[in-house]
Image (spheres, rainbow, N blue to C red):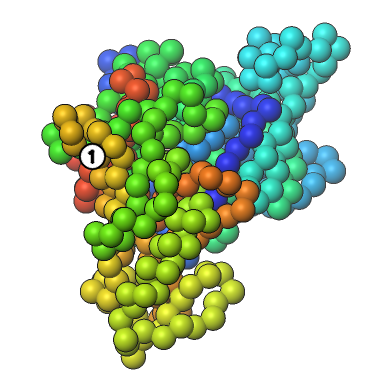
Amino acid sequence: MASRMASITGVLLLLLVVPSSSSHVKFDLHGNIYPGGCIYVSMRIGDQVYNLDVDTGSVLTWLQCHIPNCEGPCKTQHPLYKLKYDKLVPSMDPLCVELLQHPGNPEGSTCEYSIDYVKGVSHGLLIRDKFTLPIARTAHHIIPFGCGYNQQGFKPCQNLPVDGIIGLGRGSSVNLAFQLKKQNVIKNDVISHCISIRGGGFLFIGDYKHPNNVEWVTMDRNAEHGHYSPVLLGELFFNGKWISEKPMKVVFDSGSTYTYFDRQPYKATEDAVIGSLHKSLTTVRDNEFKLCWKGTKIFNSVDDVKPLFKPIFLTFGRGGAKGHKATLDIPPENYLVIKDGNVCFGISDHPRLGETNLIGAITMQERTVIYDNEAGRIGWFRDSCKGKSGSVIPSRL
């Protein structure tokens, strides 16, 4: 899925309920970075199973819905959720007033929201319906969520059967983790995910037992609504050489397939990569990626080209230990993809992001990323994405 920065005038709540003794809920991840374009989870809403793109860059969770005179994409892999008007949330509902941040319209029969993504806009209505999650016992809960009826230029994934988005963004009392905690489903508002380079992985909502080698940075509590951003600015290095002219504002967004840098750090990275190219690689044109290369033989996986490229490092001032700089290492497999036997560069720039530098899912592969809203910190460590845990609650339907 294309990168996006959400400006939300309406958001929703998705609630899954598990026994109050649980410390976390675990989901299996499905999909892949390329060619799929996103990572998703499966869950039952109403009487149908739906696939939702995992997005830590937005607090909105929504489904593509069918309503009369549907606009934009009106077909998904699964039958579209059919809107029933008795499920509409009215404008004066306290939840709508909170989500839209207005005093409410006494004559309003609906709660409408609009989300502006980088590559399109999603419009919808806030509704309530039954959510089901198979756990120790079958549980049904009536909860509010978004019925997306008009997607202009935007859909969650390009090449996978995804029906909507599960929003896990920061700083909203209506995001999923906050509400799970409010309902005593989990003990702590913590989100962890690990995206496997082979496809799949896991998502934890709630406590996650992590090792001692986590690289921690303090979370910026004043970051734009929904975004997880270190309060410290980053510095960019390529093969050990500093290449960013000034410190960089960084956002972590699992809903973005690729990584996007501001103009200067992107140009510096592009120049550094091209300047260090192995002589066996030659440039080829591609209609999807800005930079692609072919070799003397067809490449079958990133493993084939790793020795031909250099690592990138992003460091963030002082970390948890005195004088320690938290480092996000970006080896070749975390910025390259294989397409049609060629190797392509998974980092780009985007004019709508301004000075924001967005770390997307490609750069999060093979590491667990932790968004600890309780302690106000973001962390990461290298992981196999097998999701070992003593108390696992499956979510595969």
Residue ID at (42%, 46%):
246
Task: Classify the position of the C terminus by image quarter.
Answer: top left
Residue located beneath label 1 in the image: 325
Amino acid type, label 1: Lys
Task: Classify the position of the N terminus by image quarter.
Answer: bottom right
- Tell me the quarter of the picture where residue 286 sits: bottom right
Residue ID at (39%, 30%):
231
Q: Is residue 79 visible?
A: no
Q: Is residue 132 left or right of residue 19?
A: right
Residue ID at (42%, 80%):
293
Q: Residues within 10 Å of mark 1 (few under 14, many from 20)?
A: some
Q: Is residue 313 visible?
A: yes
Q: x%, y% of residue 269?
A: 41, 62
**With respect to residue 69, does 89 lie above or below?**
above
- Tell me the quarter of the picture where residue 324 sits: top left
Residue closest to the eye, 311 or 89: 311
Residue ID at (29%, 37%):
317
| Residue furthest out toward the left | 212
**With respect to residue 72, does 17 lie above or below?**
above
| Residue furthest out toward the bottom | 296
Q: x%, y% of residue 124?
A: 72, 34
Residue closest to the eye, 369 or 138: 369
Q: x%, y% of residue 300?
A: 33, 78
How many numbered marks, from 0 up?
A: 1
Q: Is residue 30 left or right of residue 226?
A: left
